Image (tube, rainbow, N blue to C red):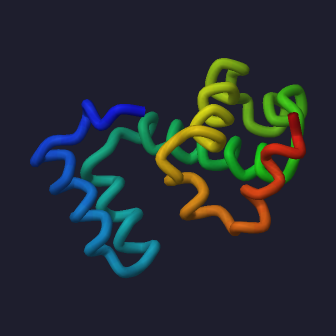
């Protein structure tokens, strides 16, 4: 994915996340900076990534998360070809299973 979204402001946002030390601090920051729907959407995508990493198939991921197949497809594409963000927060043993679920 091209870095067309990156600029000084978005880099500052990323740096702000990096400064936070605890999950509670991240929760407080997210509550202030994002809408509940945005937070829920990001949470859902992370859960989709975790389930795909475990080798779950689309129908089961839909059933467990309520995510659309379009969302699941996008997350899978990011897991396989993205910048590695999901992989950095998932256990290495989980994301290595992605190619086995095809």
| Picture quadrant of residue 26 | bottom left
Q: Nearer the viewer, residue 60 or 85?
A: 85
Q: Quadrant of the C terminus?
A: top right
Q: Nearer the viewer, residue 41 or 69?
A: 69
In the image, residue 77 above or below residue 32: above
**Residue 51 falls left or right of residue 17:** right
Q: Quadrant of the N terminus?
A: top left
In the image, residue 5 above or below residue 34: above
Q: Is residue 44 visible?
A: no
In the image, residue 86 above or below residue 4: below
Q: Nearer the viewer, residue 32 or 68?
A: 68
In the image, residue 21 above or below residue 70: below
Q: Report x, y in % for residue 62.
A: 80, 29
**Residue 4 falls left or right of residue 63:** left
Q: Report x, y in % for residue 73.
A: 68, 25
Q: Report x, y in % for residue 83.
A: 47, 47
| Picture quadrant of residue 61 | top right
Q: Report x, y in % for residue 6.
A: 22, 41
**Residue 42 falls left or right of residue 58:** left
Marks counted in the figure total 0
| Picture quadrant of residue 57 | top right
Q: Residue at x 52, y 41 (%)?
A: 82
Q: Residue at x 78, y 67 (%)?
A: 93
Q: Is residue 27 visible?
A: yes
Q: Residue furthest bottom?
A: 21
Q: Residue furthest left?
A: 8
Q: Residue at x 68, y 46 (%)?
A: 49
**Residue 37 falls left or right of residue 19:** right
């Amino acid at each position: 994915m091209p870095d067309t979204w990156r600029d000084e402001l978005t880099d500052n946002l990323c740096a702000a996340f990096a400064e936070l030390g605890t999950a509670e601090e991240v929760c407080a920051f997210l509550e202030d900076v994002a809408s509940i729907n945005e937070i829920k959407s990001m949470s859902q995508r992370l859960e989709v990534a975790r389930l795909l990493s475990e080798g779950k198939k689309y129908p089961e991921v839909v059933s467990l998360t309520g995510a659309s197949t379009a969302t699941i497809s996008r997350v899978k594409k990011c897991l396989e070809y993205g910048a590695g963000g999901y992989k950095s927060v998932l256990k290495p043993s989980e994301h290595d299973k992605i190619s086995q679920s095809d």
